[in-house]
Amino acid sequence: MTLSLRLRAGIVSALLLFTFLLGWHMAVQGVGTTQKLDPEYAKLLGASATTGKSAVPGPLDVAAKLWEHLRDPFYDKGPNDKGVGIQLAYSIARVLGGYLLAALVAIPLGFLIGMSPLINRALDPFIQILKPISPLAWMPLALYTIKDSAISAIFVIFICSLWPMLLNTAFGVASVRKDWINVAKTLELTPGRTAFSVILPAAAPTILTGMRISIGIAWLVIVAAEMLVGGTGIGYFVWNEWNNLSITNVINAILLIGLVGMILDQLMGRLQRAVSYAE
């Protein structure tokens, strides 16, 4: 991407953001409560029962609250009052734990499936049955058997991260040119040496594509999982703030979830491009 294209893209992005924020601000200013609210309920919402002030926070309110969170992100005042830094740290730790466990299982198994037509045919029915099951459907079973909400959340991340890595690894390995495999056989390389010296470098871009997809799905699922199990994490923070009727905090949490997801995706994207350039 040329500098000129990057500059123009940045200008367009800035204009789109400005337009969105301006529209949001004007919409909030122009929308009031059209019905009379109970005073206590209106107080919780942050609205006025008499003046028609909107209960929806504007961008300035959200920005002020976000700055308040970022000034002290790691405070801990009890089980239901922790900073967003702590909440995000718990979520990221669970995602990485389940994700790395999935990689340890999916990549070797994907190699085996890709290299062996027999194993491919034998495991395909199980994969086709288990793959469409929502990861959250496993949560009740995990809670019942593991009896630990944090480990159950990691298990759910493991399940949702497994399939993209497994299928992309198997596809990448199976797609390696047969000529290269035949050369390895001619040189009398062992299957292990062939896998690491010939197949892995050729299949690496496809494997990393699966890993990039998996990290995005894992980050998406952890929010829903933490809403179910409670305790700590950014998903629990969103649910807890909704129960407190703090829409401003909910919007801030959504922004932080998006930013962290973008960072994780960009990190995997950089790794993917580095491997592709090294080919």
Image (spheres, rainbow, N blue to C red):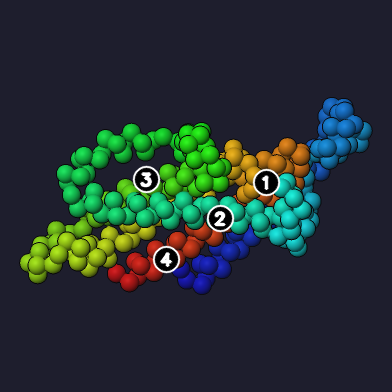
* Residue 133 in view, yes or no: yes
Dot in front, 4 or 2 = 2
Quarter residue 193 falls in: bottom left
CA distance separating discs 4 and 2 = 19 Å
Q: Is residue 4 above or below residue 199?
A: below
- Which amino acid, mark 3? Trp
x, y percent for residue 112 = 23, 52
Say which element carries label 1. Answer: helix
In the depicted view, which residue is nearer to us: 250 or 60?
A: 250
Q: Residue at x 49, y 40 (%)?
A: 146
Circle 3 packing at 10 Å, graded few (<14), some (14-19), many (20+), is: many
Q: Which mark is residue 237?
A: 1
Labels 3 & 4 near each other (Cβ < 8 A) = no
Q: Residue at x 67, y 40 (%)?
A: 239
Q: Residue at x 61, y 63 (%)?
A: 11
x, y percent for residue 26 = 77, 46
Quarter residue 15 falls in: bottom right
| 259 lies left or right of 156 | right
The residue that mark 2 highlights is 92
Q: Which mark is residue 163?
A: 3
| 232 lies left or right of 178 | right
CA distance separating discs 3 and 2 = 20 Å
- Which amino acid, mark 4? Leu
Q: Quadrant of the C terminus?
A: bottom left
The residue that mark 4 highlights is 271
CA distance separating discs 3 and 4 = 20 Å
Pointer 3 or 2: first along the chain: 2
- Which amino acid, mark 1? Phe
Q: Is residue 153 above or below residue 12?
A: above
Labels 1 & 4 near each other (Cβ < 8 A) = no
